[in-house]
Image (cartoon, grey):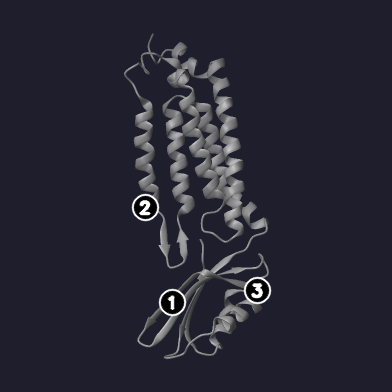
Amino acid sequence: MSVLSPESLAAYWSGPEVATNIVVFMNLLGALLLGLVVGYERTYHGRAAGMRTYGLVCMASAALTAIVGYPEFWYAGHPNVAGPAADPTRVMQGIVTGVGFLGAGVIMKEGLNISGLTTAASIWASCAIGVLVGVGFYAAAILLTFLSASCMLWVSRLESSLPSRPAIGVMLGFEPEYVPVDDVLDQAMSELGYDIAWGSLQITHERERLEWRFVAVARGRNKGASLPDMAQLLSSFVGVDRYQIAHARN
C-alpha cells in the first residue's frame, strides 16, 4: 500500500491515533500551566525570564518527552516508514541541540538589560512543533502551535495585570575621591519606592573615581518612582557627577 493512498493517510486520524494525541494535548496544557506558575515567580521578582519564556520551554519539553512514550503511533504506525533500523530519538536529540544553539544566538545582554529570551523559547517551541509533525502527531502539533502563539500574545497581558516588582539597573559615577555611603543611598532609593539588591552590587575604581552598578527592585508595580523622577533625584545627589538608569529586563 502506498504511503499516499487514502487508507495510509487516513491512519494519521484513526481512533487510536487521535486518542494518543488527546493524551499529548493534556501533557502540553498541563506543562504550559505549570511553566506559567514558575515564570510568574520570576516575573514578580523582576527577573529577565518571565511567564512566556518558562511556559514555552516547559511546554516544548513536555511535547518532546511525551511522544517518546508512544513510538508505536509514530508515522501512524506505518512499518515501512518507522522500521527497526530507524531511530528518530537520535534525530530529535540532534534537532533540539542545534536549535538550542540557534535560540541562544538571539539572546542579547547589554549591561543589566536582557532581550530575546521569549524569542529563543519560541524558536525552541517551534522545534518541538516540527518534531510532532515529523512523527505524525498532527493534532498535537496544531495544539502546540495554538498554545505557543497564545502564550506569546496574551501572557504578557496577564503578566501586566498581576502583582509584580519591576527592576531597574542603576549606574552611579561619583566625583573624584568621593566615597559614597551605602546607608544614605539605600535611604534615597527607599524614598523612591525601591529596594537595592545589594547582591547585584558591582564597584569599579578608575582614575580616583568610584562607579557603582546595582539592581533596584520596586516594592510594587505602581509603588516605584518613574525613571524621570529618579533621574531628577540622582542629578541632585551629593557626590554624583554621572549616572545611567534603565529597566533591568526586557
**Which one is closest to the eye, mark 1 or mark 3?**
1
Disc 1 secondary structure class:
strand
Farthest residue to the left: give it: 85
Location of residue 182 in the rendering, given as x and y in whole percent from the top left corner: 55, 81
Looking at the rendered structure, the kind of residue marked 1 is: Ile
Farthest residue to the top: give it: 1
Looking at the rendered structure, the kind of residue marked 3 is: Gly
Cα distance between the residues tagged 3 and 2:
36 Å
Measured along the vertical axis of the image, is residue 92 above or below residue 102?
Answer: above
Q: Residue at x 46, y 78 (%)?
A: 212
Q: Residue at x 36, y 47 (%)?
A: 102
Q: Where is mark 1, residue-wise?
A: 203
Q: State which quadrant residue 221 falls in.
A: bottom right
- First in sequence, mark 3 or 2: give its number: 2
**Which one is closest to the eye, mark 2 or mark 1?**
1
Q: Where is mark 2, residue-wise?
A: 105
- Asked whether the residues under the numbered discs 3 and 2 touch, taking CB atoms below 8 Å apart as contact, a structural biologist would say no
Q: Residue at x 67, y 56 (%)?
A: 161
Q: Looking at the rendered structure, which numbered label has been put on residue 193?
A: 3
Looking at the rendered structure, the kind of residue marked 2 is: Gly
User: Which is nearer the eye, 41 or 123?
Assistant: 41
The quadrant of the image that shows the N terminus is top left
